[in-house]
Image (cartoon, grey):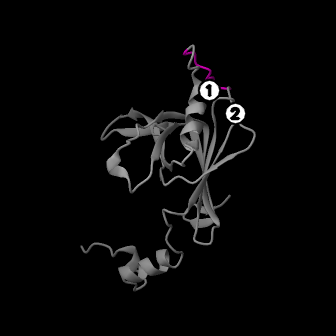
């Protein structure tokens, strides 16, 4: 018995035609089109940054295993966000970026008494991080919004005379509780999805 044809052959399309009609016609997302906004009660105005690099986290389900007969099933019972957001920022000559995150971390754990000021409703120490992903026309295509965000770690920086033709960068790891994802309207087998 012959195997069924691949879906893109059903209408006589080649794999190249299928790729052109279903992907290239909409354009491809560029990893350089983004901007971020950080909001918190720590400061009066939202902070706009343009990091050089962002590592977006994944998501998964917490599962329980069920097996009555045959292979076991993994049953999803809760959402899990078990990775962090990592960003790389260029450092200006006045070290404003480093100062910003140093001061924010001092608000979370008091540097003099080593007491934590973090609480689940303590909005003064954590904030909201929003990442806007845009197309080449600067129109927003998707939004990642992270709740209860705070800088978990500042990665060590390297200084040295061998680096005269470059500039300083700071890497920051952000912890968060959860994120929401919104995207421009599109249609798939589940129907329309929009924000």
User: What residue is rendered at 39% in x and 34% in y?
Assistant: 66
Q: Quadrant of residue 113?
A: top right
Marks 2 and 1: CB-CB under 8 Å? yes
- Residue indicated by mark 2: 42
Q: Residue 52 at x, y = what percent?
A: 49, 55
Please give the range of residues in magenta: 114-121
Horizontal relation, residue 160 to residue 129: left or right: left
Work out which quarter of the rendered image holds the C terminus and state it. Answer: bottom right
Q: Residue 48 at x, y = what percent?
A: 64, 50
The residue carrying pointer 1 sits among few (fewer than 14), some (14 to 19) or many (20 or more) residues within 10 Å by Cα, namely some
Work out which quarter of the rendered image holds the N terminus and state it. Answer: bottom left
| In the image, residue 7 above or below residue 55 | below
The outermost residue toward the bottom is: 12
The outermost residue toward the right is: 44
Q: Please tell me whether the stretch drawn in magenta is mainly helix, strand or loop.
A: loop
Horizontal relation, residue 40 to residue 55: left or right: right
* Residue 107 numbered tag: 1
User: What residue is rendered at 45% in x and 48% in y?
Assistant: 168
Q: Nearer the viewer, residue 192 or 52?
A: 52
The residue carrying pointer 2 sits among few (fewer than 14), some (14 to 19) or many (20 or more) residues within 10 Å by Cα, namely some
SS label for mark 2: loop
Judge whether residue 115 is colored magenta.
yes
């Amino acid at each position: 018995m012959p195997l069924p044809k691949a879906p893109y052959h059903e209408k006589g399309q080649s794999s190249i035609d299928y790729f052109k009609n279903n992907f290239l016609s909409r354009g491809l997302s560029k990893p350089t089109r983004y901007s971020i906004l950080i909001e918190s009660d720590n400061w009066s105005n939202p902070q706009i940054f343009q990091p050089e690099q962002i590592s977006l986290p994944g998501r998964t389900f917490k599962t329980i295993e069920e097996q009555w007969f045959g292979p076991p099933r993994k049953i999803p019972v809760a959402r899990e966000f078990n990775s962090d957001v990592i960003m790389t920022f260029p450092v200006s000559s006045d070290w404003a970026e480093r100062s910003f995150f140093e001061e924010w971390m001092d608000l979370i754990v008091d540097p003099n008494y080593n007491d934590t000021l973090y609480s689940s409703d303590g909005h003064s120490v954590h904030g909201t991080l929003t990442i806007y992903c845009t197309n080449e026309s600067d129109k927003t295509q998707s939004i990642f919004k992270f709740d209860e965000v705070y800088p978990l770690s500042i990665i060590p920086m390297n200084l040295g005379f061998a680096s005269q033709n470059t500039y300083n960068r700071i890497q920051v790891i952000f912890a968060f509780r959860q994120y929401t994802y919104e995207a421009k309207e599109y249609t798939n087998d589940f129907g329309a999805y929009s924000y």
